Image (spheres, rainbow, N blue to C red):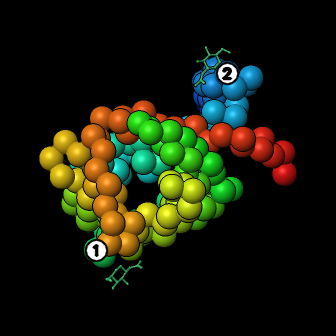
């Protein structure tokens, strides 16, 4: 009898401990940022391959990476528009961005478009060349210092959907 009572209190103690720990974790009023642990992993995949984190916007819902082939897909949850440094190009990210990621190189990229010279261009690949990033648009390339992409950009005109 005494033994089961002991276990009961033991159990209750752990239950209250558990509840107090789990309720003390995040601030409820910025629960929208609770997703921020997910982007960190997708962004750290970038840095592991030598790329700056700023190539992906803040809002990454999920991602997939085949470690063998390097094929990846990044799910942003919604199409994203953002301003790319340093020349303030307007860029759009599709809801789903796919490509192939190997050390120092992203190829077969699909889902990122940049507006330049009054036209939209699909970025097909990104290469690391020393301290620069080389963006490939088909046969054309444009080079920018990697450090321009050290900050994670925010999507602009984002709909704070409640659905
Ligand atoms: C949560 O909100 C507080 C103030 O409301 C802010 O100081 C803090 O940086 C926020 N945390 C995150 C992770 O956004
Ligand atoms: C990963 O890529 C390899 C090589 O292309 C392929 O054989 C394998 O099925 C892929 N794995 C998954 C989980 O898609």
Q: Quadrant of ligand 2?
A: bottom left
**Residue 70 falls left or right of residue 37:** left
Q: Position of residue 22 (x, y in %)?
A: 64, 29
Q: Which residue is the site of mark 2?
A: 27
Q: Residue at x 18, y 52 (%)?
A: 129
**In front here: 10 or 48?**
48
Q: Which residue is the site of mark 1?
A: 68
* Above or below 74: residue 83: above
Kindly tell me whether mark 1's CB lies below 8 Å from ligand 2. Answer: yes
Q: Residue at x 28, y 74 (%)?
A: 68
Q: Position of residue 19 (x, y in %)?
A: 68, 27
Residue 5 visible in image: no
**In front here: 152 or 2?**
152
**In front here: 85 or 147?**
85
Kindly tell me whether mark 2's CB lies below 8 Å from ligand 1. Answer: yes
Distance between mark 1 and mark 2 Cα atoms:
39 Å
Q: From this viewpoint, which residue is outermost toward the left?
A: 130
Q: Which mark is residue 141?
A: none
* Above or below 60: residue 120: below
Q: Residue at x 60, y 61 (%)?
A: 94
Q: Mark 1 vs mark 2: which is more N-terminal?
A: 2
Residue 134 visible in image: yes
* Above or below 22: residue 152: below
Q: Residues within 10 Å of mark 1 (few under 14, many from 20)?
A: few
């Amino acid at each position: 009898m005494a033994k089961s009572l002991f276990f009961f209190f033991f159990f209750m103690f752990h239950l209250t401990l558990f509840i107090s720990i789990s309720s003390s974790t995040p601030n409820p009023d910025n629960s929208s940022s609770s997703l921020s642990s997910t982007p960190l992993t997708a962004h750290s995949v970038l840095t592991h391959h030598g790329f700056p984190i700023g190539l992906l916007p803040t809002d990454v819902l999920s991602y997939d990476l085949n470690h063998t082939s390097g094929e990846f897909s990044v799910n942003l949850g919604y199409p994203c528009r953002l301003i790319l440094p340093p020349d303030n190009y307007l860029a759009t990210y599709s809801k789903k961005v796919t490509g192939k990621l190997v050390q120092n190189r992203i190829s077969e990229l699909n889902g990122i478009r940049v507006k330049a010279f009054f036209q939209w261009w699909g970025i097909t690949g990104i290469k690391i060349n020393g301290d620069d990033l080389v963006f490939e648009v088909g046969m054309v390339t444009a080079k920018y210092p990697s450090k321009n992409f050290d900050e994670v950009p925010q999507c602009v005109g984002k709909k704070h959907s409640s659905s």
